[in-house]
Structures are given as structure tokens and as C-alpha cells.
Amino acid sequence: MLEVASKAGIEWPLDEAATNEVLMATFYPGRLTSNNPRKEADYSAIHKELAKPGVNLSLLWSEYCETCYTNGNTPYMYSQFCDKYRHWARVTKATMRIRHKPGDVMQVDWAGNTIPIQDPFTGDTTEAYLFVAVLPCSCYAYAEACADMISGQWLSCHANAYSYFGGVTRLLLPDNLKTGVVKNTRYETILNRSYQEMAEYYDTAIVPARVYHPKDKSLVEGTVKYASTWIIAALRNRRFFSIAEVKKAVSEKLEELNHFPFKKREGNRHRAYYEEEHDFMKPLPFTPYEPAIWSTARVPRDYLISDGKNKFSVPFDLIGEDVDIRLTEKTVEVFFHGSRVASHPRSAAQLREPVIRFEHMPLAHQKYLSYSTEEFQAWAGSVGEQTNTVIKLFLAAGREPEQGYKACASLTKLADRYGHERLENACQRVLLYSSSPTIRNISTILKNGQDKIKTGRELKSETSSSYGITRGAAYFQKGGEPE
């Protein structure tokens, strides 16, 4: 008897799974088969069915009973049914836990310890942080070294974890970090907008761990501790001089962790994942997720918003309004009341000038950008000779023609206000006494109406034409004698 018990792995005190039927089958296998009228369930099939969403042992027992009654067999009671399944799972070393369904949850957290990085030139030390994600069913883990714990890095680590697993879980269970959760109370949960957008992209739901309930994340915290030993502690004697070196070392240690044999059952994390969980993961999106950071800003008077390094334009009519800014690695998008109003390519380098779209400018600014020497000369030629002369003087006044664009533009505004004829007269008058006309002089002439007053030269010309010749040509032809 002792030899049979030793071979079957039965020890005192007896395990809860060692029921009377189990002991009978172990010590007297022939007797139980002939005298047992109850139908044995297909525990392998039950194990697979439990992996499906919403399926539990109670439902499977009711289906088992219905099948037995249909075939004229006697089923086990519910307690015996559960005991037999648990015994089968223990004996066959099944890796799946009844309380964790495959592909259901991914738990994430930052490790408490860090990995030091030494600057090879100055000797200064910075810290590398370890992101850890775990699938509770198979205990399959992902770890990544990061230079910081900002929001963008947090989102990138999630995307990399899903790519590593080759699929997406139904739920995502993070801690209450500010990079992911804005507010989490017993009444409401408010998520960071960027974090929520990432979850929607992967078609997963974020369920933060309850505050002051460490059991909600017991497995991931255990895996974080395990990762700290296998990765951080294992690398304690190595010196790193860049984050790239740390990432490579962490990746190597991660593979060792996932392939290290389980102590209490057969296999390892990698094998358990691909045998029992991989097929239940949701498929990845066709294109990789690009992390995006959201922020809010009020549009200033220059209608330029900043990404922290460069400035980008938005429509000028949004001056004074609050807009939402979405930043990715390659784009800057601006939203107003949920509608996108601007989009710009984002540069990693610092630009000398702001990025401005022509259509975002007021009409006056658009006109200013469209100014050119040829355009001003063509316009002046359509007004008159005197105006054309003034425009040429404006363009030649500085070292470059662009220095005279402002005066030329002001002259066009005077033409719009007073008309071409009066502007032509004003230019003629100012040229009579100055070879360097200014906008102020021309504007003063127009305001005071001096362009309407005839000059002395004009009056003299009119007088000579009216009174200089009073007798016709016939008079002189006759010798000047009266008839």
C-alpha cells in the first residue's frame, strides 16, 4: 500500500483533492470501474471550455448533467464534479488557473528599483526604469528599460508589450499612476486622455486597480518583484554607459525569465503562454500604435501654439480660445470642440522660424506675404506715372527692395481710401519739392486736400493759355490794321 501511495504521490495529511473515489481508484482500480454507475466527465474538454469568456464550472456541470440524463447515465454531484476536475488539473500539471482566463487581462506596473547608467565622460549617474507587464493566466512577462517614466514612454511600453505578446487582452489593469489615471474613486474613474486613446486603438478596456486593494494586482506585483531579482539584481555588477546597453541586457534577461522552468509544475512561462493562452488573445491592429500626448492651450495673439520646442500656426479666428493639442512623434494636431482645425509635421530639431500655414493668417498678413517688387510696380503703373515714380523710389530707398515693401503697401491702402486720381495728384505734388517722398507726406497731402489745390506752375500755365493770345491768326495776316 505504501509503495502504491508513493507512486501515486499520495502523502499524509491527505490533499483536498484526494477524495474517497480517488483513493479507491488508486488502491483498488478494478473494483471502482465495475461498481461505479456514475459517468466520468471529459476533464480535458472542461479545461478548454473554461478558457472561454463567461464560462465557469457551474455552467459546465449543468451541461454535463444534461448530457448524462440524455444518455441514461448518472452524473456526479456538483461538489464531486469540481473536486474531480481540480484533481485532474493538479495531476496533469495544467498551467491555467480557474480564476484567470487566458487572454483576459494584462497587468502593468513600474518596478520599484532602477538600473544605474554612468556617463563615460563626466562619471555622472542616471537611472533607467523598468516597465513590467504580465499575463496572469500563463504568467508570461514583458519587461523594458526606459530612460524616464513620462506619459509618452508609458504608452510606448504598452504598445511594445502587445507586440511582444503578439496579441491584445480584453482588459488592462494598471496601478493608479498619474500618467494613466487622473482620478479613481469608489464612484468614478477618470483616465488620462492619451491612455484612453491608446486603449481604444487596441480595443481593450482599462480597469485600474482599486485604491488600497493590493490583491487587485498581487500577481503583477509578484512578477515585478520576480523581475527585479532576475533582471535588476542579476545586472547589479554590470556597468552600463547608455540606455541602449541597458535595453539589450534587459531583453536578454527577459528571455531567461520566461524560459526558466516552473518550480511546482512542468513547463515555463513561454510554453504555458503558447500552449494555453496565445490563441485566446485579440489580434493586433494592422499598423503599430503611435503614442500621442494631449494637452490644452489658449491661442495667443500671434495664433501660434508650441510643442515645447517649435511653434505652429492655428486659424487666426481662434485667438483667445482654448484648443486641444495632440502631439505624436511625427505630427502636431490641434482640435477645437472635437474638430481638427490644424495639422503640421513635427520636427525633432529646433526650427529657426515658426511653422505657419498661409490659410491660417488674417487677410492683411496674407497680402503681406504675397508682396513682390514686380507686383508693386505693376500696380503703380496702373495708377499713373507719378505713383510709379514714388514706388520706384520706395523700393530703391533701402539696401534691399523688401525694405520698401511696407511703404509700398501703405501706398496701396491710400489708393483704396482716396482713389487713384487723388493719389496720383498727391504723388505729383510731393515730387515737386522732394526727391525722397514718404508715406507721411503723401498722407498729409491727402488728408488736408492739398492734392485738390493747383500749384503756381499750374496756375501760370492756365493764365498763359487763357490770356496770352487774344487776337486770332487772321488779324496778323492782314498786317494788324482794322477793317
Image (tube, rainbow, N blue to C red):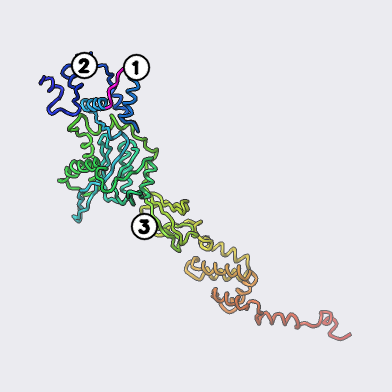
For disc 3, the marked residue is 309
- Nearest the eye: 395 or 415: 415
Q: Label 1, secondary structure: give it.
A: loop
The amino acid marked with disc number 1 is Asn
Please report contact status of discs 2 and 3: CB closer than 8 Å, yes or no.
no
The quadrant holding residue 297 is bottom left
Residue 45 location, x and y as percent?
Answer: 30, 24
Q: Label 3, secondary structure: give it.
A: loop
Separation of marks 3 and 1 at Cα, in angstroms: 75 Å
Separation of marks 2 and 1 at Cα, in angstroms: 21 Å
Let me know if residue 406 appears in the view: yes
- Looking at the rendered image, the disc whose residue lies closer to the viewer, 2 or 3, is 2
Let me know if residue 248 appears in the view: no
The residue drawn where x is 32% and y is 43% is 158
The amino acid marked with disc number 3 is Lys
- Between discs 2 and 3, the one toward the N terminus: 2
- Nearest the eye: 412 or 377: 412
- Type of secondary structure dominating the magenta stretch: loop
For disc 2, the marked residue is 32
Magenta span contains residue 297: no
Please report contact status of discs 2 and 1: CB closer than 8 Å, yes or no.
no
Point out the residue furthest to the bottom here. Answer: 481
For disc 1, the marked residue is 71
Q: Is residue 350 left or right of residue 395?
A: left
Residue 244 location, x and y as percent?
Answer: 25, 46
The magenta span reads 71-78
- Placement of the N terminus among the 4 image quadrants: top left
Point out the residue furthest to the left here. Answer: 2
- Placement of the C terminus among the 4 image quadrants: bottom right
Q: Is residue 111 left or right of residue 322?
A: left
Residue 482 sits above or below residue 441 on the image: below
The amino acid marked with disc number 2 is Leu
